[in-house]
């Protein structure tokens, strides 16, 4: 991967919400998983809770 495509991939990775692909760092011959930061964990939890509320509200209105 050249520098330009690496920069594009990094920009794409950071544009997502919550946990990002960027946290998974690959190096030649090595796989290293970087734990999410506290801010990423909070964002991910909030996203999950919002999804659950939306789903439960939808299920309740269907019943």
Image (cartoon, rainbow, N blue to C red):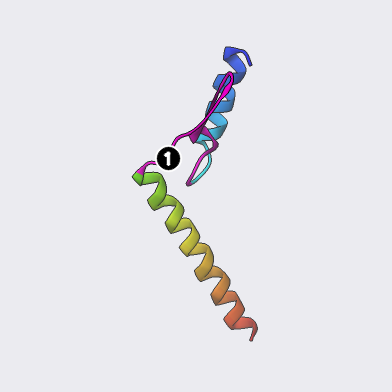
Quadrant in which residue 8 is drawn: top right
Residue 53 in percent (x, y) is at 50, 70
Considering every residue shown, the one lying at the far front of the view is 29
Q: Which residue is mark 1?
A: 35
Considering every residue shown, the one lying at the far top of the view is 2
Question: Could you say which is closer to the camera, residue 42 or residue 62?
Answer: 42
Q: How many marks?
A: 1
**Residue pictured at 34% horizontal, 45% vertical:** 38
**Residue pictured at 38% horizontal, 52% vertical:** 42
Q: Is residue 29 above or below residue 15?
A: above
Q: Is residue 51 above or below residue 12?
A: below
Asked if residue 23 lies in the magenta stretch, the reply is: yes
Q: Secondary structure at mark 1?
A: loop
Q: Which residues are magenta?
A: 18-37
Q: Quadrant of the C terminus?
A: bottom right
Q: Quadrant of the N terminus?
A: top right
Considering every residue shown, the one lying at the far bottom of the view is 63
Question: Could you say which is closer to the camera, residue 14 or residue 36?
Answer: 36
Residue 46 in percent (x, y) is at 43, 58
Quadrant in which residue 13 is drawn: top right
Q: Is residue 18 above or below residue 34?
A: below
Q: 58 left or right of 17?
A: right
**Residue pictured at 58% horizontal, 20% vertical:** 6
């Amino acid at each position: 991967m050249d520098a330009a495509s690496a920069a594009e991939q990094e920009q794409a990775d950071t544009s997502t919400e919550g946990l990002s692909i960027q946290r998974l760092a690959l190096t030649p011959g090595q796989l290293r998983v970087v734990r999410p930061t506290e801010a990423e964990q909070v964002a991910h939890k909030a996203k999950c809770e919002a999804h659950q509320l939306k789903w439960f509200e939808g299920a309740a209105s269907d019943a």
